[in-house]
Image (cartoon, rainbow, N blue to C red):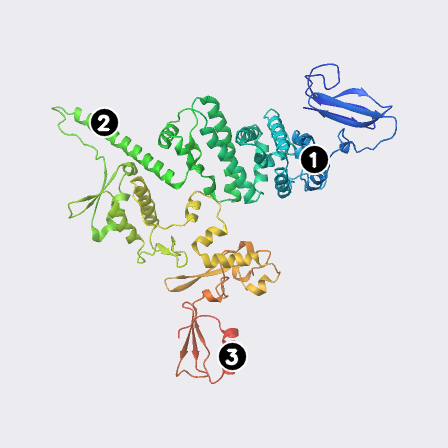
Amino acid sequence: RHTLAYVRKLGRLYAFGLNGSGQLGNKTRKDASNPITTIDIWKLKAWHIAAGGDQSFLTVSQDEVSQDYTKKNFFDIPMYLSADTYDALSSDDNFTSRNLSLIFSSYSCLNGSFSIIDGDKWKKNDNGMNLIEARQIIRQILGLPKQILLDLKATLVETFQPKLHFYHSDQIRFLLLLPEFTSITDTTGKLFFVYNYCKIINGLSEDLKEILISWWSTLGAAYFVHIVNVIKDCILSLFAQPSNTNASNKEKDLSFCLSVLLLLNKCNDSAAIINYTQFYLTEIIRYINIEQDYVQWISNAKGLCFCQYPFLLDNLIKTRLLDLDAKLLQQNVIEGIARFNMQQIMSLSAANRSVALVQPYLVLQVKRDNLLADTLNQIMNSNPDNYRKPLKIVFIGEEAIDEGGEFFLLIIREILDPKYGMFQVMEDSKVTWFANKSFETDMMYRLVGILCGLAIYNSTIIDFKFPVALYKKLLKKKLVLEDFASVKPAVGRGLQNLLDYEDDNVEDIFGLTFQISRECYGETEVIDLIDNGSNVAVTKDNRCRLFLTGTDHVPVTGISSMKLIFQSTHGADEGKLPVAHTCFNVLDLPVYKSKEVLREKLLLAIENGTGFGLV
């Protein structure tokens, strides 16, 4: 863990780093953080320089030698891996594990392996490694004799100990390779290997962690999911350890692994490399009581809680926890009200013969024929603290009391009624989305939000088919084209076609502007997406800014998506021009005597037709 540096012009050899065995050559055992002069060899020329372990080597010559000392070593083999160097190594008749072990035993050698960068500079967002080549070479290594693989396994276990400190991005490039090496080890070695990998990452500075995340974000799905999976396997292996395993050490090991999964999930949130479900680790419920884990988490108890990492839990587990959370809150509310009411009763006296007791339930009394208005009035006039109480519904004039099931079914059906114009069911996707324009007040939408919350809180399923895009907006997460396509699939495909179009003549082929039109209560509403959008053409350079199409052009989805109606106006004067009802996509065509006349009249109408009129 030390470095030698030769300055040719001065004829001096400098050294710095660890010096526990006197390897710096300054006749002491004191570590040096700054370069110190070891020996003066100005009359000689350095031939070989090497440093490793607790040893330093220097060979010199009186003759002029090459200045490229980086390519000089005591072993006549390359000190990095690539397709070329591996072919050269494996073609040697005397090929042994020693050849590869020398490379695998050095962070520096691995950092320089599989390089695709010319020169010695790497960018923050460019890891500089050809990982496809790396995976191919590792697959070839797996085909080597068993003894060589055993030797390599021993080397890897010895090398990747989390003892070093790293200060620069050039020093951590090997972290991209480590997960690929797990295939060389057995189950026990893999557990040890992945644990150390996670511990090394946890020991990095925040700046280096951010650089590593940026590198992860450039990986393909296959490489990224492999890293996720080997860490998940490590976590399950830790759980499967015998019950007599030191609990403190086990928890520490789990924390290291979970922290790295958290970084990977952060990366995936922004880069969307793999589906979020591939982080699920539902197998953990075989080893832990998830409800007890949740109670421990909300109680801020010491120790590791898996509920700190919700991205590991699937919807079924989260539903169980949501139900548990609601029951705990309701229980606390009821117990609190019971204590208050008891105190009120105990305060009764000759001077105070009546007390006001608190209702432990949120009771809504509604009429079936006035359901929405009754609910709105009572919800809006209720103290929000009452929303935490268990819900009871009384239908006026009926004996039974509903706990929410029928009530939510009826009121959601009422809210979705087109007469209110609050929501619309999208034709292609069948999901529920907000109406383009509604005459209802914000209070009505607030009511819908409260009703959704009450339904969840009272463990009731409601039939609101909202897309994922809505929940991403609530979480203030960035929306992408796929989110739009989940609401309007046909338009989404058209926009993707626009983005994928490679030629420069986007303006001529698509004929779009930054203006959209949409139907609203039987009329067409025109909206500029940007200032003066109707006069700004969509080009290859600005197409990424578009989300919708213009009114006077064929949609991006193609003319097949437009419902155009051509109707004949029999008896109309042949001298009249065609008339377009733009709000309804209807074109009135008089009966002309020939195609030539039709063409003439139609072009005349297109070129000169502006404004609105009554027909």
User: Which mark identifies residue 599?
Assistant: 3
The residue beneath circle 1 is: 80
Quadrant occupied by the N terminus? top right
User: Which mark identifies residue 405?
Assistant: none
Task: Name the residue rendered at 48%, 71% in the picture.
Answer: 610
Between disc 3 and disc 1, the foreground one is: 1
Visible residue check, residue 456? yes
Q: How far is mark 3 from mark 1, CA to CA?
A: 73 Å
Considering depth in this image, is 31 or 436 the residue closer to the camera?
31
Count all numbered tags in the image, as a single digit. 3
* Residue type marked 1: Tyr
Q: Specify the farthest residue to the left.
A: 350
Residue 317 lies, with reference to residue 45, above or below; the image says: below
Judged left or right of residue 46, residue 407 is left
Task: Name the residue rendered at 66%, 34% in the picture.
Answer: 111
Q: How far is mark 2 from mark 1, CA to CA?
A: 73 Å
Considering depth in this image, is 128 or 102 the residue closer to the camera?
102
Judged left or right of residue 568, residue 197 is right
Task: Name the residue rendered at 22%, 52% in the picture.
Answer: 370
Which numbered disc, 3 or 1, marks the residue that appears first in the sequence? 1
Q: Which secondary structure, mark 2?
A: helix
Q: Which secondary structure, mark 1?
A: loop
Percent x, y for residue 429? 41, 56
Labelled pair 3, 2 in contact (Cβ < 8 Å): no
The residue beneath circle 2 is: 339
Q: Which secondary structure, mark 3?
A: helix
